[in-house]
């Protein structure tokens, strides 16, 4: 393991796995809300990923279809990661 493989233990509020909170901390909440009014696919993408948590990645009950929906919601042209990359 390398020195920077893990975040510092300084209590930083940015080292979390809660999309809604990260969006707020980044100051992008209002921008996403405005863009979702013009893009139903972006709104659908956000609805799919907003409740993801660190624990969700260990949930063996998630179906293949749900995993595929998450992947699509993140990577499609109106997906969340695509939207974030345009603003970061």
Image (cartoon, helix red, strand yellow):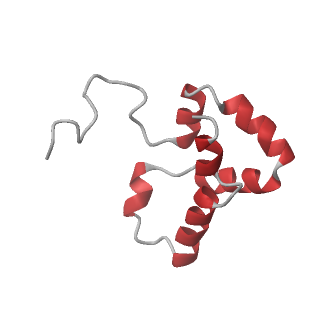
Q: Give the x, y percent position of residue 81.
A: 58, 49
Q: Nearer the viewer, residue 38 or 86?
A: 86
Q: Residue 3: horizontal and vertical position, in percent?
A: 16, 36
Q: Is residue 82 above or below residue 58?
A: above
Left or right: 23 as drawn, with respect to 7: right
x%, y% of residue 45? Answer: 68, 55
Please indicate, yes or no, whether residue 50 appears anywhere in the rendered image: no
Which residue is found at the position 59% from the left and 53% from the top? Answer: 49
Residue at the image point whose x is 86% and y is 45% from the top: 38
Residue 42 appears anywhere in the view? yes
- The residue furthest right is 38
Residue at image position (67%, 50%) is 46
Q: For this view, does 44 lie left or right of residue 8?
A: right
At 64% across and 57% down in the image, what residue appears? 48
Q: Count the labels in the image.
A: 0
Query: Which residue sits furthest bottom?
Result: 64
| Image x and y of residue 18, in percent | 50, 41
């Amino acid at each position: 393991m390398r020195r920077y493989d893990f975040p510092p233990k300084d209590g930083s509020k940015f080292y979390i796995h809660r999309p809604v909170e990260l969006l707020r901390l980044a100051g992008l909440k209002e921008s996403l809300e405005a863009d979702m009014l013009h893009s139903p696919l972006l709104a659908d993408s956000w609805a799919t990923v907003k409740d993801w948590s660190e624990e969700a990645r260990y949930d063996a009950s998630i179906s293949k279809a749900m995993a595929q929906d998450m992947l699509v919601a993140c990577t499609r042209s109106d997906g969340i990661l695509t939207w974030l990359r345009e603003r970061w």
